[in-house]
Image (tube, grey):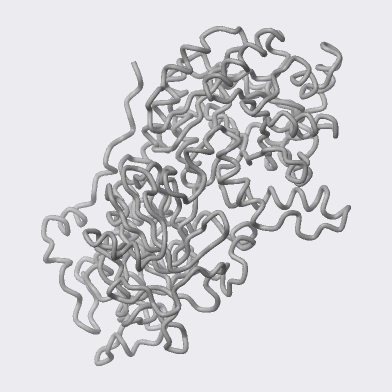
Amino acid sequence: MFPRSYATTGPPRTALARGCAEHPSRSAAPAPTGQIPYAGRLVPLLGVVLGSGHPARSTSYAGVFRLRHVRGTPAAAVRGRRWTDGQLGTDGKQASGLTNDGQPGPSSGDQHHPVQGPSGGQQRDRGAATGSGGGRNGVGRRGFLAGVGLTGAGGLLGAAVPAGTSAAAEPPRHTSTGGTAHATPTAASGAGGPGTLRPEQLSGKRMLLVPELLLLADGPVRGQAVLVESGKFRDIGPAKRLIAAHGDLHPVRLDGHLLMPGFIDAHHHLTQSFGKAKSFGQPSEIFKTIWEPLEHALDEETAYLSAKLAALEALRGGFTTVADAGTRAPVDVAALAKATDEAGIRCVLSKIVSDGKSGPAHLGRWGGHPLIHPSLAIAVPEDATAAVIKRTADMCAEAGAVLQIHVNEHLASVERSLKSVGRRPIDYLHHIGALGPHLLGAHATLATPTELRQLADSGAAVSYNPVASAWKGNAVAQATMMAAMGVRFGTGTDGTRGDGFRLVDAAESAQRLTSGLATGDSSCGAGKLWLDHATRLSADAVGLGRVTGEIAVGKAADFLVVDVNVPELTPSFDLRWELVRLSNRDQITAVVVDGRLRLWDGWPTDWDGHALVAKAAEVGPQVVRRAKLQRVEPT
């Protein structure tokens, strides 16, 4: 029996929210110029919203006020610049993009560079997603005041647009929204109406999406569109052609946004989320003192909660796929499958088979599941006999699955292997015939030149986990050398931090510090290398190269909608470098997996993420206490 599913439609709405929903007329018409919408209701709530006693309640009210004001008022009257005939630059000329009728502007085309200079971002409707709690992190106090038409400069009750002044005459300005600045155009945005991108626009079974920028394998391009149908990319090409070919679909414009592949986490431990912080500051090899006790303390419900919490964090960080390396928890891995399936993330789900049993049953258990891809695992080579490792490797090769195994991660494990079998871990796997395209080795931080050549020649893949090296490693994998030698590799979190943008930043930074400085290599592969190995090539490493990892016809529609109209990317000159070094997960407007909208502004659209977090906060410490972890407390 599985624990109850956290799949509700969200926390109860406030009385005010219910009133607005039950009486649409209350929010249908814009407030008269110079007047404050809902002023009668606002005053009693100011103490709640501006106070510190009830932050959750404040977020709810702010989301309601802000949502209704933006929906009921022309976008230009709320804030931002005014575009009337497509997206305009500061000189008033039409920039590359689309006009109001959805047709390409005069500068549309395949330009392999991002927006440069000021760019109109499309205001997304925060708080509209079910169960979102009012947006990514709720609406801040300043955002609340701006959303209801109050400005700091004009006093607490000053109107956003003074009486007698037209909305169009209001000077352009940026307003902080959820921590990110946006300019709001009035260009048509598909079914969402002028200047507003809403979650329902990304919720159709068939969608024609027209982003400002599209990240393809060869780089970012403009003037392109994608057709998403039945969970896959069915057509990709010039927006003008797709719009003409699919006249039955209303194009959804994503002005100021990049559509890019989701990140692929090539190495995760979904049932270790409750104890991540307990591993900080510990000696390098901690699986015996931290991870095994923690996972052994899990039961079916807490394993499910841990996995779903990890999946939510991963989605928030822009990951659309995670490869779980196998759990030691005494539970059926179906609990993990249920958690990831409900969360809406693609999962390469491993079962540890060090005893040589149950491998075929696991590989055949998930046939046809859209999000669960079975895999087998042996934690480390020393956990199984040579015969079991070879037989398991052959089984995975025949089934088209991957065998996940930790290799050459810590000095202690390398020395144990030398003492027990006379060979280093990778060399040992090569010696017994287990290396091959079906094998995914985690870490490989202490690989010799000979072992790197064995990996390249065999076609085996590696998960490069730079944050794990920084937090608890003995070394950093030679990723730039692997790339030069033709070793297949993806990037993984190892369950450390579920943030795709920070992962690619760490991947590049670690190489710069460990090899780039010593050799005078100032680029270390540049932005393209790390984005490729975090998306397309990471999918290849986990055995899903034919399924996901890039925006390509026939591939799964696993993608991110990323706000690029932010200070960090202004002005923009090389988008791939900028995504690696400058971008943040708070720019992720939407996460789509298998063609379905899973997250909007950081929170699920069809289940209650806040309830899950609350439950994990309750039971997580109980699990940690029960585990009796053996920590070292240095003085």
User: Above or below — where is 208 with respect to 115?
Assistant: above
Residue 195 lies left or right of residue 475; in this view the side is left
Instruction: Please tell me in which quadrant of the rendered image residue 343 appears.
Output: top left
Residues 284 and 520: in front is 520
Residues 157 and 276: in front is 276
Q: Is residue 103 visible?
A: yes
Residues 205 and 10: in front is 205
Instruction: Please tell me in which quadrant of the rendered image residue 21 appears.
Output: bottom left
User: Above or below — where is 317 with respect to 166?
Assistant: above
The residue at 50%/26% (across/down) is: 349
Residue 633 lies left or right of residue 164; in this view the side is right
Residue 559 x, y percent position in the rendering = 45, 50
Residue 244 x, y percent position in the rendering = 29, 65
The residue at 30%/80% (across/down) is: 77
User: Above or below — where is 62 with respect to 229?
Assistant: below
Residue 337 x, y percent position in the rendering = 42, 26
User: Above or below — where is 82 with respect to 313?
Assistant: below
Residue 125 x, y percent position in the rendering = 32, 62
The residue at 77%/40% (across/down) is: 476
